[in-house]
Image (cartoon, rainbow, N blue to C red):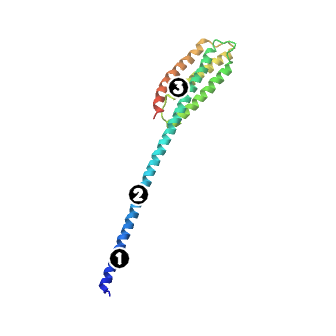
């Protein structure tokens, strides 16, 4: 028969074994929670970095598109201004003064839209040489309009050559600003 002391020793052993088992399970659960927490934190940080990289890549590609559109539309505007400056030597194929100015105005409006896109993609208030290019072309477009109106108002076959001097000066100013813009664009689109 067993004595009360031996029963209590056996019960103590079972309690000890149960406590060790409970502590072991608790340790495993704590380790699992720490592992899951670390995994979630790592996943979150990786996700944030991936999202930032995707956003940066998207903005970079949008800047490239906007700068390319600006350069293409500037070139188109310059060609229409050249038509305006050649209007001083009209031929049978020379468009009417209104058609010339409508083309210049349309091309200038496209350039202005491109400038707005660039400003948005650069952060709004960030200065850019694109503004200088657009400003020079705005003046050139105005000079073209004045020269063409002189032709229409005075019923002249062509405006006097002097009326194109300002247009040519503004076109040259636009070309110089465009050179600076292209240099700026090459650095901005790679950021």
| Alpha carbon separation for disc pair 1 and 3 | 88 Å
Tell whether 10 sits left or right of 175: left
Q: Earlier in the sequence, mark 3 or mark 2?
A: 2
| Rendering coords of residue 151 (x, y %) | 66, 15
Residue 54 marker? none
In which quadrant of the rendered image does the C terminus lie?
top left
The residue pinned by badge 1 equals: 14
Q: Which mark is residue 35?
A: 2
Quadrant, the N terminus: bottom left
Disc 3 versus disc 2: distance between alpha carbons? 58 Å
Does residue 122 lie above or below 84 as drawn?
A: below
Neighbours of disc 1 within 10 Å: few (<14), some (14-19), many (20+):
few
Task: Determine contact: label 2, label 1, CB under 8 Å.
Answer: no
| Whether residue 124 can be seen here | no
Q: Residue at x 55, y 20 (%)?
A: 171
Task: Identify the residue shown where x is 60% and y is 15%.
Answer: 163
Q: Tag 3 or tag 1, which sits nearer the N-term?
A: 1
Of labels 2 and 1, earlier in sequence is 1
Outermost left residue: 5
Q: Nearer the viewer, mark 2 or mark 1?
A: 1
Q: Is residue 151 in sight in this rendering?
A: yes
Q: What kind of element bears circle 3? A: helix
Camera-near label (3 vs 2) is 2
x then y, percent, for residue 180: 47, 25
Residue at position x 35%, y 76% in the image: 15
- Separation of marks 2 and 1 at Cα, in angstroms: 31 Å
Count how many numbered circles sit on residues in the image. 3
Determine which residue is flagged by label 3.
Answer: 133
Name the residue: 62% across, 14% down. 86
- Binning the other alpha carbons within 10 Å of mark 3 as few (below 14), some (14 to 19) or many (20 upward) gives many
């Amino acid at each position: 028969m067993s004595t009360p002391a031996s029963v209590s020793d056996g019960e103590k052993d079972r309690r000890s074994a149960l406590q060790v088992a409970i502590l072991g399970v608790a340790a495993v659960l704590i380790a699992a929670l720490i592992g899951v927490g670390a995994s979630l934190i790592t996943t979150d940080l990786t996700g944030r970095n991936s999202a930032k990289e995707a956003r940066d890549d998207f903005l970079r590609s949008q800047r490239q598109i906007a700068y390319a559109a600006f350069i293409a539309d500037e070139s188109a505007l310059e060609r229409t201004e050249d038509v305006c400056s050649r209007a001083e030597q009209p031929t049978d194929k020379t468009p009417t003064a209104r058609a010339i100015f409508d083309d210049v105005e349309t091309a200038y409006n496209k350039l202005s839209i491109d400038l707005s896109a660039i400003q948005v993609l650069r952060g709004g208030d960030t200065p850019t040489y694109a503004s200088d290019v657009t400003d020079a072309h705005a003046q050139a477009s105005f000079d073209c309009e004045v020269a063409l109106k002189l032709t229409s108002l005075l019923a002249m076959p062509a405006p006097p050559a002097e009326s194109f001097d300002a247009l040519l000066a503004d076109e040259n100013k636009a070309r110089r600003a465009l050179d600076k813009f292209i240099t700026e664009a090459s650095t901005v689109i790679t950021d």
